[in-house]
Amino acid sequence: MKEFKIIAFTHRNTPLEQVGKYHVDPQIREEVLQSLRKSLNLKELMYLSTCNRVEFLFISNDIVDHRFLNHFFQSFKPEWNTADVEESASRAILFEGEDAVRHFFRVASSLDSLVVGEREIITQVRTAFEESSSFKITGDFIRLMIKSTIETAKRIYTDTPVARNPVSVVSLAYRKLKNMHVKKDSRILVIGAGQTNTSMCKYLRKHGFTDFNIFNRSLANAEVLAQMVGGKAHTLDKLQTFDGGFDVLITCTASSGHILDPQSYERLLNGDNGRKVVVDLAIPADIDPSVYKFFPVSAILVETLRQAAEENLALRHSALDQCEEILNEQLQEFRGLYRQRQVELAMKEVPKIVREIREHATTNVFARELNQLDEQSREIVDKMLIYLEKKYISVPMKMAREILLDNKEA
């Protein structure tokens, strides 16, 4: 388990506007991660990216020191200069071994989230694993660890009050919209059709909003979201000529730069000088901050949700001790699963070795004696050897499991 490491950038150690620099465009993600794994000779690799964290989970025999981290980030973003690489190497939080497992249990259980108790993270973790697995860069350990991680998160969400009446970034943003008394017939312009915007639009639809125009790089994804909320779908390039106006602009994309600057924002207004509501949940921000200087805007940004998130943490603080107890129990359970899996892997060669011994015995050591037997006798001997072979495989495995269970109970 010592080989398991996590390099993390979260809202705890990195300004939210800087977390986005570690995002990888989905269109090139497989290529980047395959190259990273090969360059660092990583046995396994998984990549998690959300609006307030980016984490690299990997298996490596190497010592993760400053030199390793420099190599890591040079390989991750070859276009970065020395200052970017050095800053990332200095800022990164490293978890190793059981500490890394515990950390990821906390991540998936939303105990390390900007908003404690938001359930979106468990879906994001599962999706990230499935994506990395599809790239064929994960392996046996990460698979086993993610299985335990999901079980831990589900138990915490079910057995503790930490996720009851959840206050996610989306619901916090909606609460601010509600406090602004935004009318239900408002024209809502949505940029991006990812998970955050999907959740936001479904939330708005649930509360009576009906007028949606969805813009996304992929028209197919925009159409899926538009169908969910009864809106209209457009490709992102059509945003430049859209003249339908808007009252509320909601944006959350994976863009590394601004989607709208003052000029493009003014074009969208189409001569409307009224105050607008902008909800920018992207990291880094999709809207150039100078927009808020030149136009009447009520802005709802990720940073503005920090205070509400801290209040949320205080309200749920009473449940954290109970969550930690569950984490301890689940970590102990994982230790047992890990040891059992190590035994299984170590004994994976046993069937092959036993089979080779049997074949050597019948074709070499006792070949002459067997040839002197009649056909029926040889069949009986062969059946006995196959029976013994199976027992020599199953009995040690059973004994090993019993030893592991005894140790766990002890």
Image (cartoon, rainbow, N blue to C red):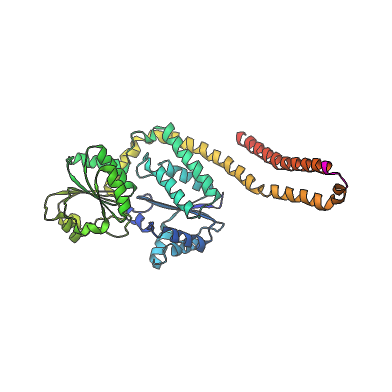
What residue is at 37 percent from the left and 54 percent from the top?
14
Q: In this view, does 153 lie above or below 20?
A: above
**Residue 9 in sight from this viewpoint:** no
Left or right relative to 44: residue 345: right
**In the image, what residue occupies the spot 16% across and 51% down?**
245
Q: Please give left or right for residue 36 compared with residue 342 in the image.
A: left
- Image coords of residue 128 (percent x, y): 43, 49
Q: State left or right for residue 346 relative to residue 208.
A: right
Q: In this view, does 20 lie to the left or right of 364?
A: left
Q: Is residue 74 visible?
A: yes
Q: Nearer the viewer, residue 285 or 367?
A: 367
Which SS type dominates the magenta stretch? loop
Segment colored magenta: 372-376
Is residue 259 inside the magenta stretch?
A: no
Indicate whether 409 appears above or below 362: above
Residue 246: x, y in percent? 17, 49
Q: Where is residue 358 in the image (x, y as percent from the top left)?
A: 77, 48
> Which residue is at 38% across, 44% downward?
113
Q: Nearer the viewer, residue 302 or 171?
A: 171
Q: How many labels does the image show?
A: 0
Residue 370 drawn at (x, y percent): 85, 47
Q: Which residue lies furthest to the front in this view?
A: 375
Of residue 176 and residue 90, the one placed in the foreground of this image is 176
Q: In which quarter of the image is the C terminus?
A: top right
